[in-house]
Image: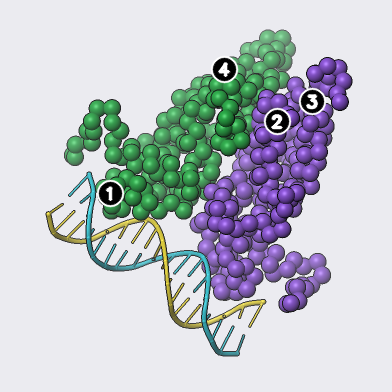
Chain colours: A purple, B green, C yellow, D cyan
Amino acid sequence: MPRPPAPAPGEPSTRDQILDVALDLFNTNGYDKTSLREIAERMGFSKAALYYHFKSKGDILLALHMRLHELGVEEFDDFDAAVVDPEKWGPLLDRAVDTILENRPLITLHTRNQAAFEALHESGHEIPDHDEQHDDLQARLTRLLTNPDVPLEHRVRLACALGAILSGLFFSGEVFSDVPADELGRYLRGAVGDLVAPITARPAKRRAARG
Amino acid sequence: MPRPPAPAPGEPSTRDQILDVALDLFNTNGYDKTSLREIAERMGFSKAALYYHFKSKGDILLALHMRLHELGVEEFDDFDAAVVDPEKWGPLLDRAVDTILENRPLITLHTRNQAAFEALHESGHEIPDHDEQHDDLQARLTRLLTNPDVPLEHRVRLACALGAILSGLFFSGEVFSDVPADELGRYLRGAVGDLVAPITARPAKRRAARG
DNA sequence: GTCTATATTTCGATAGAC
DNA sequence: GTCTATCGAAATATAGAC
């Protein structure tokens, strides 16, 4: 098989550089309005060369989706394990705030190009190595929010917490652009904390002890 | 000048029917991946006929944006007037929850096609009758969230509340699809209420009286 | 791995008849 | 108001040389 790319140590591979460029262009102009010609132009080589690294435009988007997947799969595992213990939600949500704020471009890509990702799903594209344990993040999120072991009101709260974090991310671009990231993160953690406080602050609800 | 369209009383005009069809297609396939041919096909007439009612594809999107504008301008006026009185936020946010839940397709269009709307803005298109008082909703939202008369932490809370509502809207499509709208609305109002409670519940913060 | 050149398709938009 | 026919542009993707 062809030898995997071996760039200078520490240097990102051409493939990763393409993804970085594509991520930037997709976020500024939108996925659909970004042409392969633009990506190639900024990379410094021709459009056809892109097809050596990716077999289609959708494949570039899919690769970026995989970046998010790798980013979130660990946190999702922890969430799945702790979802029935609301008192454990706090630290997990705090970590989610950090992860989201630290990966703004990747998250922004997904929130601002939802239609494009959905078309990817329906086009028969699939996550390369997904099995029952590691399928798409959206499917896992759906399963989490429909878990009958968690009261509906709590699940709505969880969804709201996620939306609150994402809105903070969204406005961090223009509205709160001069607010230091750690300060914004502190406020967000406070907001999310209050959002789930009615849940997490009642360790004894059904009787007085759990299990 | 040409007589404005006079459809059967109670029947929506052809123009409005086109907008309804376009809204549905844009939401299912995305704006960029929806062609004028599809819209015309579902309308039952040819593609060229669309150009009698709209001068471009972007004009259709702009008209849909105007629908949201008319929907939100009133609520924004009230928010602008009350933003310095946090104790008035509660009822306004409750109304925002209702408005958003009652106009899901229109809101979804905007959240899922942000890039398309942004391109509209940069293409020189402008809101037909906008003046200093009634400009674009996003500009008004930005001004609201950057208002120096409101403490930063409060503004972040406001942004989070908006995000929480929108996330509830987002998940109402698939995850919470079997939850009655009024029940979901109740939970959302509760969540938003807790989110701004630390603000609205302190009418006396600076001394003991305001003004 | 990257190039030039081109195939193929689709779309937005216009012209002009009715 | 709607039609047929068509234009022109731009995009994705491929073929084959280097």
Looking at the image, residue C4 lies above or below residue A202: below
Name the quarter where the C terminus of chain B is drawn: top right
Q: Nearer the viewer, mark 4 or mark 3?
A: 3
| Residue at disc 4, secondary structure | helix
Q: Which residue is more in the foreground, B12 or B114? A: B12
Q: Are marks 4 and 3 on the same chain?
A: no
Dot 3 falls on which chain? A
Residues packed near mark 2 inside 10 Å, few (<14), some (14 to 19) or many (20 plus)? few
Q: Position of residue A209 (x, y in %)?
A: 87, 20
Residue hosting label 2: A148
Dot 2 falls on which chain? A
Looking at the image, is mark 1 or mark 4 earlier in the sequence? 1
Residues packed near mark 1 inside 10 Å, few (<14), some (14 to 19) or many (20 plus)? few
Q: How far apart, in angstroms, are the residues tagged by discs 1 and 2? A: 47 Å
Dot 4 falls on which chain? B
**Three-letter residue code for mark 4:** Pro
Mark linked to residue B45: 1
Mark linked to residue B91: 4
Q: How far apart, in angstroms, are the residues tagged by discs 2 and 3? A: 18 Å
Asked if disc 2 and disc 4 are in contact, CB closer than 8 Å, the reply is: no
Q: How far apart, in angstroms, are the residues tagged by discs 2 and 4? A: 32 Å
Residue depicted at 41% across the width and 34% down the height: B67
Asked if disc 2 and disc 3 are in contact, CB closer than 8 Å, the reply is: no
Q: How far apart, in angstroms, are the residues tagged by discs 4 and 3? A: 26 Å
Looking at the image, is mark 2 or mark 3 earlier in the sequence? 2
Q: Are marks 1 and 2 on the same chain?
A: no
Q: Are marks 3 and 1 on the same chain?
A: no
Q: Nearer the viewer, mark 2 or mark 3?
A: 2
Residue hosting label 3: A200
Residue depicted at 75% across the width and 73% down the height: A4
Q: Position of residue A56 (x, y in %)?
A: 57, 66
Q: Are marks 2 and 4 on the same chain?
A: no
